[in-house]
Image: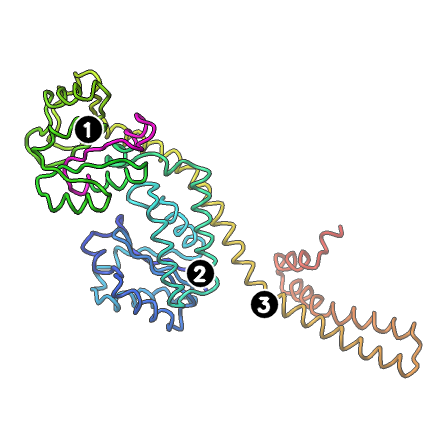
Amino acid sequence: MSLLAIGINHNTASVELREKVAFGPDKMSAALKQLAANSNVNGSVILSTCNRTEIYCDVNTNSKHKLIDWLIDFHQVNPEDIKPSLYIHEDQAAIRHLMRVSCGLDSLVLGEPQILGQVKQAYSESRNHKAIEASVEKLFQKAFSVAKRVRTETDIGGSAVSVAYAACTLAKHIFESLDNLTVMLVGAGETIELVAKHLSGHGNCKIIVANRTRERAQNLANEFGGKVIALNEIPEHLKAADIVISSTASPLPIIGKGMVETALKARKHQPMLLVDIAVPRDIESQVSELNDAYLYSVDDLQSIVDSNMAQRKVEAIQAEAIVTEESAAFMSWLRSLHAVDSIREYRKASNDVREELLNKSLQALALGGDPEKVLLELSNKLTNKLIHAPTRALQNAAEQGEPSKLVVIRQSLGLDDLS
């Protein structure tokens, strides 16, 4: 059997192609059942996200092409479309690939933590469908522990590498804690939704969502326990905001210097953080001239993101070293399993010889044989029986001119340790 990882990802295939071979919830169950019933496959896990589709499995030797044919047939795609985008990793390369994926080293955003949860979900799906076997089970458990080690020993996931997350991190650094602060989110698009999700993980803050379309804003507010206002109500509520994060598609600024100045007076000059991640800008740049108003633009945040990404790349060097070490160790353990059957057979054969000769010796003693002679005969016969096969192997290696084999046999017998 051989460990195998077959797939496509954001580096090798377009979105259109990735969509064609994605295993959605409606397809996953059938796919896992088919793989479980496949005589060439001994355990499998399917990882399918927006950025990758991968199959990890233990297969019979030289069965990788059959697995590729199965993937093509299952999704009814043109082989010429998918084959150039496929990558195939075997044994230690497959082990290393899964570990890199689990650690976020193969992600579109280096070090992102969400992929580990997706790998765990894929593993759980396989277990629920009884499609996973011992070697694949051990591989995934090891990948999870390696991902935990990487997160513990490196800071690869510790820096903000999205503008939305950087905005929240900036807010946390300035205010230390977001508990009991009021945050006004201007807009209700994808970026603001990400901001809201990050904020919810940083503290128990009050959220006000200001948006042109009340329905979309209401859905966001309901999810995070906030309240909704219209854009023209911003001046009235701005004084309550400790933090303002804005991202709309407005062609003109929504929040002007005068509006913020009035709000600051009402706040008795308590500081206000304003983060403008819109292009064009939502907040007039002159706001930065006001005392107690701290304005950051998307360019400011991008410089933070770029710096943090550079730091992640530094941390990735250590993470890669951990993955290299752990994948080699796991492969060594996997190879050691191949010797288990041989060891078991050798031990059984030796025990069979011992029991046969021991029974004969006991019978001889029972018939009144001389104990010293019986023991001497037992020891001689046992020695001769046990050394017969190794002796023949040594002779054959010498006669056939195979010095490397001779060295291996000598090492196996411990002869070199005696010199």
Instruction: Say which amino acid is labelled 2.
Output: Val
Q: Along the line of sight, which residue is nearer the eye, 46 or 217?
A: 217
The kind of secondary structure element at disc 3 is helix
Q: Relative to 241, is 220 above or below?
A: below
- C-alpha separation, residue under disc 2 versus residue under disc 1: 55 Å
Q: Nearer the viewer, residue 401 or 417?
A: 417
Find residue 140 and report its image quarter: bottom left
Which mark, residue 341? 3
Q: Is residue 118 magenta?
A: no
Task: Please give the residue where the numbered disc 1 appears in the rendered image.
Answer: 240
Relative to residue 97, is residue 308 depicted above or below? above
- Cα separation, mark 3 vs mark 1, equals 73 Å
Nearer to us: label 3 or label 2: 2
Left/right of residue 48 with respect to residue 150 in the rendered view: left
Residue 238, how many percent across, how many down?
Answer: 15, 28
Going by the image, does 230 lie left or right of 330?
left
Residue at disc 1, secondary structure: helix
Residue of label 2 = 136
The magenta region covers 169-192
Q: How many marks?
A: 3
**Label 1 sits on what residue type?**
Ala
Please report contact status of discs 3 and 1: CB closer than 8 Å, yes or no: no
Mark 3 residue type: Asp
Disc 2 versus disc 1: nearer the observer = 1
